[in-house]
Amino acid sequence: MNLFSQDKALSDFVEKAYIKLLEASYTINSENIKEIPYGVTLKTGKSEDKLVSVAIYHTEKKGFSLVTTDPEIKSLLLSLITNVGTLGSDEAGKGDVFGPLVVCSFLLGKKEESLLKLGAKDSKRMKDEEILDIYEKINADFRDSFSMVRIMPERYNSFYQSLSEQGKNLTDLLAWAHSKAIANVVAKRDDITRVLVDKFTPSYSANSRIIAAAGKNPVDFQVRAEQDPAVAIASVIARAGYLISLNQISETVLENKFKLVPGSGAESDKLLEEIVSHFGKEILEKIAKTHFANCERIFS
């Protein structure tokens, strides 16, 4: 019988959260624990007269998420989702026509647990301002906790072309970037207990390359791995690196005449046409991933 929710995974998590909070000297009134659509709410605090609300949500697609105004409680409960010593790896820019491909591997070790208070989650569910703010704080004090690999457009296009000539594709490029980022952290930290990669391929050769880069550390490949805080933070750092690079390209290559945007839809197509009209087609090698259909339409 599920104690707190009809969703067994959610019920089990709430039970662990309940125990974790009690162990940390928080007060919980069981009468305040209520099931809501896709979640459970409860009230907790250090005393009965200072209770704060906590909402714990779960779906098969998005995993777990927490909503509370208390950063200490959020940090405490997020620690239940991950294992200390997890090296998470994720990428940004893969589906964006402009700018680089960025991969980040981030280690959530003992000293990084304080970062759980920042509220990082899958970067696709965050505003750019939030992403850049969290990155600034991490980059200032936790430089040895992560490695970021940025493949800027000119290098990306050359690399992609070389792989294509060998019968390889974007999967192999991603495997190379993840492997490099993971190996960089493995080389400087000895407190890694496992590596968790947001799964992007079932390819044995690509995954084997990543496993080799992890050395003696076990590697898990999971779909929607961003629900783990280590991967979520890696996702945020990667996206920050991507956004910063977009601005750099806009300022230097495009001389501030155009501002590049993420994505690959109609807005990107319109901007591509305007940039090519001003600078010529040769500019695309320096600002975009030229194998995207958006660029191929211009070259055709």
Image (cartoon, rainbow, N blue to C red):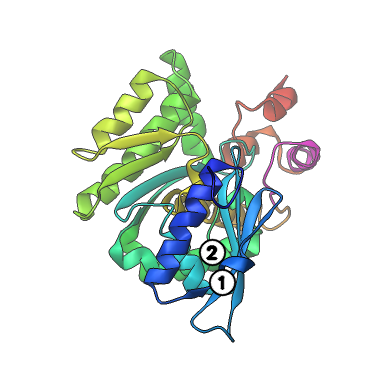
Name which residue lies at 59% across and 38% down: 60
Residue 151 appearing in the image: no
The residue that label 2 is drawn on is: 119
Give the left or right position of residue 142, taking residue 222 as reference.
left
Q: Main secondary structure of the magenta part?
A: helix
Q: Can residue 173 be seen here?
A: yes
What residue type is disc 1 on?
A: Asn
Instruction: State which tag comes first along the sequence, 2 or 1.
Output: 1
Quarter occupied by the C terminus: top right
What residue lies at 52% left-to-right and 31% top-to-bottom?
157
The span from disc 2 to disc 1 (Cα, nearest Å) is 25 Å
Q: Which residue is mark 1?
A: 29
Q: Position of residue 81 (x, y in %)?
A: 44, 52
Contact, mark 2 vs mark 1 (Cβ under 8 Å):
no
Residue 156 picture location, percent across and down: 49, 35
Instruction: Using the image as rendered, state which of residue 97 and residue 248 is in the foreground.
Output: 97
Q: Is residue 96 left or right of residue 275?
A: left
Give neighbour class at mark 1: few <14, some 14-19, many 20+ (Cα, 10 Å): few
Residue 216 disc label: none
- Decide whether residue 196 is among the magenta residues: no
Tell me the residue at 33%/59% (across/down): 145
The amino acid at mark 2 is: Gly
* Left or right of residue 77, residue 58 in this image: right
User: In the current view of this chain or complex, which residue is farthest to the top?
Assistant: 167
Q: Is residue 35 above or below residue 163?
A: below
**Residue extent of the magenta highlight:** 260-277
Give whichever of 133, 250 is nearer the camera: 133
Examine the rendered structure and indicate whether residue 11 appears above or below residue 222. below
- Whether residue 265 appears in magenta in the rendering, the answer is yes
Q: How many marks?
A: 2
